[in-house]
Amino acid sequence: MKRIQYYGLLRLRYSQGTIVIEPEPPPPLLRFFRYDRRVGKYRCLSYLYRDIVEELSRLGLDFIDEVLLPMECGELSGKGLKLRDYQEEALNSWISAGRRGIVVLPPGTGKTIVGLKAIELTGTPTLIVVPTLELLDQWYRRLRSAFNVRLGVFGGGEKRLGCLTVITYDSAYINAELLGNRFPLLIFDEVHHLPSEGYRHIAELSAAPYRLGLTATPEREDGLHVHLPRLVGPVVYRKHVPELSGKYLSEFRIVRIGVRLTEEERRRYKELSARFKEFFKRRGWRLRGVEDFERLILRSGRDREAREALLAWLEARDIVLNAKAKIEKLAEILRWHRGDRIIIFTEHNKLVREISRRFLIPEISYKSSGAERREVMEGFRRGVYNAIVTSKVLEEGIDVPEANVAVILSGTGSSREFVQRLGRILRPREGKVAILYEVVTRGTKETFISRKRRRGLRGASELSA
Amino acid sequence: MLPSSLLRVRIYGRSISPSYARFGGEELEISRALIDLYRRSVSGRYGRLLEGLERLEREAEKRGVDYRLFRGLNHLLSRRLVLRKPELPVDPLLVRRKVFRTVNELYGGFVLDGLERAEVFKRVAAELGVSIEDVWRAFNAVYEEEMIVEEFLPPSPEDLLREYNLSLTQTLLFRCLRLDVTLDVTGYEAKIFLRRVKRLGLLYMAEKLPRGVRLSIDGPASILKHTERYGTRMAKLVPLLLHFRRWRIEALISSRGRRSRGKRRFYWFRLSDRASYLLPRRPVIEEELFDSGVEEGFAREYMRLGLPWRLLREPEPLVAGTHIFIPDFAFEHDGRRVYLEIVGFWTEDYLRRKVEKLSVLREPIIVAIDESLGEFKVMGEGNIHVVRFRGSLLPGKVVPIVRMLLPVRAETRVKRVVNVEDVLGGELDGLTLGELERKLRALGFKDVDLLESLKRSGYRVRWRGISPEDAFIERVKGPEGAG
C-alpha cells in the first residue's frame, strides 16, 4: 500500500537542460537517472524525457509532469502545403515511426515543405535549427507564408522567440538550456551537422518528444552519424538523385575542364611540393591520409620545420586553387552562357572578390553585410541578377530557382559539398538541362581532389551526357 | 579569450599549463612592435595595417617567434581598434546595387572586357551625378580593407602580455570539465563569486578547509556526460579571481592532443595567486558595508554598547551541507563565534527552506525575523535560535542569547590599563587597533583595556568600519592630550 502512495508523489521537472525526478525514481526507471549529490536529487539528460514518460505510463504510475512549458501558440493550420507523392510517403513514414527520425532527400527536392507539413500535422510549437543565415531567412519566409502564428528568429543578431522559431545551430547550442522545454517538436535542417561534439547538446538538452531531421546525406566522414538515431531517430525515408531525376529534378551534365599553371606558378608549385616531400622523407614519416596530415598540423605549433612544411603545403594549395588560368577559363565559360542563370563557387573568399571585381558579378560571402547579402539573394531569386559568385555560403539548402549553370572553380574533396553545389541547379523546368563545370588544374593534387568529391554522385554518372 | 587554435600549452605528465609570456626578451619586443604598428595606423586605411601585420608576422617568425603568440597578441589588440567607414559622396550599397543592375540590363549578368566595364561605370556616375572615381571608390568601400582606423587604445607592452596570459588561461579552460576553486576571502567576496557561479548556470559543491573553502564547480549535465559545454562559462570566473588576494584553482582539462593520437586525455591545470604577477592587476573589491538599513542600524547600536563580544560583518563563508552560507554577522569571543542572520523580507516557504538549510550548520546561529510582514510559524531548534523584531533590530533582542551561548569568564573582564606610548616606545599615529593589540600581545601584554589605555595616553580611535583593522589611532590635539 505504501508503495503506491509513494509513487503517486512522483514529480518530473526541467532543470537547465536536464530532468530532475522527485523524490526518487522507482527501480524500473533507475537506469535513466543518476544521483546528483550536489543537489541531493536524481537527474538525467532531457532527451530521455519521452522514454521516461512512456515507461511510467507502461508501468501505470501516476506522476506530476512539469517538464514541458510550450510556447504560446495560435492555430497551426498551414496554407498552400501540397505534397508530391514522395514527400507524402516521407511524411507518413516519419509519422508511423512515432514522429521521430530522418528524411533523406536529394538537394532541390523540397525538404522544407516536408518540415512545414510535419509542423501542421503535429500542431505544436516547433524549433527549426538551420546551419546558415541564408537558411534562417528562407525558413522564416516559408513559415510566414504558410502559417498565421507568432514567429521567432534566433541568430544573426536577432533574438526573438515565437511559437515557431528558426535558429542557427550556433545559437541553439549557446541557448540550449533556455530552449530545451519550450518546443515539443524539433526540426533539424541539414541534420548531418548535429552529431558534432558541441551541437549534439542541442538534442541532448532538449526534452522535445518529436524530432525530424532533414538532409541529403546523413553520413559524415568522421563517422559521427552513428549518434543520429539516439539524437533524432533512425533514417525513416530515403531517395537518391537518380530516382528522382527527370521528373522532380532537372537532367544535368557535368563538364570537367582542365587548365594549366603558368610557367611561374608551376616553378613555385614544384619548389613547394619538393620542400614538403623532403620534410616528410627527412623525418621518415609517410603521408597516407588525413591522420598523418593532422599530425603535421599539431606538430607545427612547436616544431619550426614542421611549420615550414605546412606553410609550403598551404601555399602550394593556394597556387593550385587560385591558378590564374582559372579566371581566364571562367571568362570563356561566361562567354558561352551570356543570359543564363549562373552560380560560381570557389573555395576561398579572395577569389570571390577578384571575380566580383573583374566581372562585376554580385558576391555573397560571410564578409559581405547582411543587408547586401539579402539584397543579392533576393535579386538573384527574382531574376534581377543573372549571375552570382560565392564561396561556402550558398552550398546548403538555399532555393535558387531557375539557375541552370554552376561553375566550380575550386573546392574541397568533400562529396557532400559537391552534391550540394550540384543541387543548386537541379530545380526542374520543362526541357531544362543543367550544366555543372568543374575547373581543375592539370598535373596537380587537384585532380585527386576532383575525383574524390565526385564519389558523392553515386550512380548518377549514367545520367550525364 | 582566444580562438582555440591559438592556445599554447606545456604538458608534464598529467599536468597541463599555458605557455605564459614573460615580460622580457623577444616576447616583450614583439608586443612593443605590434603596439607601435597599431598606433601608427591611426587615421589610415585598415588595409594598410593588415599588410603591415602580415609583414611583421613573417619577420617575427624568422626570428623564431611562435606565430600563435603573434596572432594571439594581435587578436587582443584588434579589439582595441575602432574603425569607421570612409567618407564618400555616395552610399556604397546604393552604388553597388546600381552597378550590378546596370551590368545585368546591359550585358546579361557580367562584363567581359574593359569597354563594357567602362560603360557601366560611366552610366552609374552620370546617373548619380558623381565622378567615375567616386563610383569606383564607393564600389570597393564595403570591403573591410577600405575602412579607416579611427582610434586605437594602446596598452603598455607589459599589460598586453598580461592580458594575453589571462586570455590563454581562459582559452585552456574552454575544455574544462570541472573547476575546483579554493578561496580564502571575506563573506562579501564569496557572495559576489557565488552569485556569478549561479548566474552562469553552473553548480557547486562546497567543502570546508582549515583556511577558506573549496568549491567544486561544474554544470547540471556534468554528472551525466563528459562535456566541455561549461568550459567557456568557467573561464568567465577567472577574471573575478584576480580581484581576490588568496585563491587557487585546479581544473580538470580534457584534451585531444598530439600525444594521445586523437583520443581524449585528462590533465590537471593548477594556478594560484602566486602567479598573479603574470596576470592583469585588478583592484580589490570595495566592500559595500551593508545590504540593508536594518543591518546598518543594528551594527551602529551594538558598537555603542562596548560589549565584550566582537562584532564581525559578513564573516568567512560557512559550509552548510554541500552549500555555502554567508551570515550577516558574527559575535566573537575567545576564538568562539555565534552567528546572526537578519531576515527582512520573507515568505513562509522561504523561511522554511532557510531553516532547513541552516539546520545542517554545526555553528550556533541566531535568526532574526521581521514580523511586521506577518505571522510565521518557524521555530528555532538545535543550533538555531529565532528572534522576532519589528522594523528595526535592537541589540537587546540578541545580546541575551549571545551571552548565553558565549559566556564571558569573569577574569577577562578585569583589564589592565597601560601607558601605551611608554610600552611601545614611540608614536602610535596611523596604527589600527588590531595592530596595536598584536604588538602589545607580542610584548606579553594580554587583557589590556585598549580603549581606556589609549585615552589615558592622549589618543583616540577613529572607526571607519566595525573591525579593529578599520579603527585608526590618532593623537588628540590640544593641551589635555599631553598625558
Image (cartoon, rainbow, N blue to C red):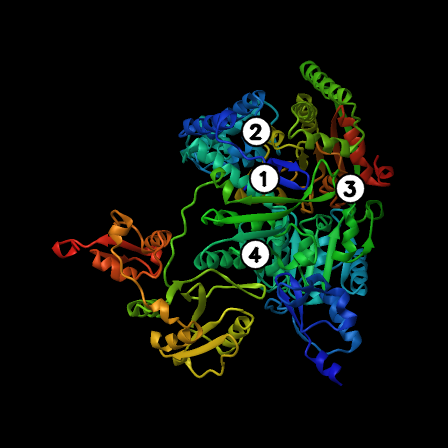
Tell me the chain of label 1: B
Task: Name the side, left or right, on which A461 lies relative to B63.
Answer: right
Q: Secondary structure at mark 3?
A: loop
The answer to the question of whether label 4 and label 3 lie on touching residues, with beta carbons closer than 8 A, is: no
Q: Are marks 2 and 1 on the same chain?
A: no
Q: Which sits in the foreground, A451 or B350?
A: B350
Left or right: A135, with B346 as reference point: right
Distance of label 2 from label 1 (alpha carbons): 31 Å
Residue B3 numbered tag = 1
Task: Give how far apart the Cα atoms at labels 1 and 3 are.
Answer: 24 Å
Q: Quadrant of the N terminus of chain A?
A: bottom right
Mark 4 highlights which residue? Answer: B215
State the separation of the CA atoms marked 2 and 3. 36 Å
Pointer 3 local density, CA inside 10 Å: few below 14, some 14–19, many at least 20: few
Kindly identify which numbered label has been placed on residue B165. none
N-terminal-most mark, 2 or 3: 3
